[in-house]
Image (tube, grey):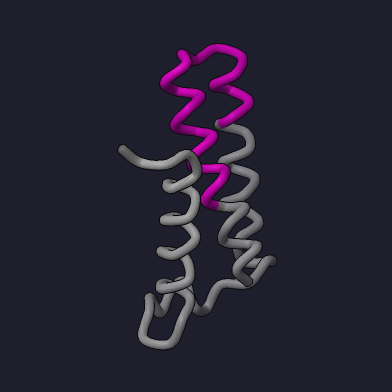
Amino acid sequence: MPESGDGVIELIAVMDRLRSPGGCPWDARQTHRSLVEYLLEEAYETVEAIESGTRDDLREELGDLLLQVVFHSRI
């Protein structure tokens, strides 16, 4: 059975691989500035899920938003 937080640790490990040499060229080129549109989009989608979505919608959008936070943190 997975331990609490295993998913977050895995997300961080994936982002590290994507941003490291030999990882994804697109991810490696990104900057805080180039990611702003994605961060805003995910934030708006999260708000929409809070206001009119289901619990599953919110969970999905929070995951997408967390990915953006981890991406910016990795940069």
- Between residues 56 and 53, which one lies in front from this camera angle? 56
Q: Is residue 56 above or below residue 1?
A: above
Residue 26 in the figure: left or right of residue 51: left
Residue 68 in the figure: left or right of residue 59: right
Q: Is residue 15 above or below residue 60?
A: below
Q: Residue at x 55, y 32 (%)?
A: 45
Give x and y (percent) for residue 5: 50, 44
Quarter of the rendering containing residue 11: bottom left
Give x and y (percent) for residue 60: 44, 32
Q: Residue at x 49, y 15 (%)?
A: 53
Q: Residue at x 38, y 75 (%)?
A: 24
Q: Residue furthest right?
A: 33
Q: Is residue 10 above or below residue 3?
A: below
Q: Quadrant of the C terminus?
A: bottom right
Does the magenta portion include 56?
yes
- Between residues 71 and 30, which one lies in front from this camera angle? 71
- Between residues 8 and 28, which one lies in front from this camera angle? 8
Q: Residue furthest left?
A: 1
Range covered by the magenta-colored residues: 46-67
Q: Is residue 75 above or below residue 59?
A: below
Give x and y (percent) for residue 20: 46, 81
- Between residues 10 and 70, which one lies in front from this camera angle? 10
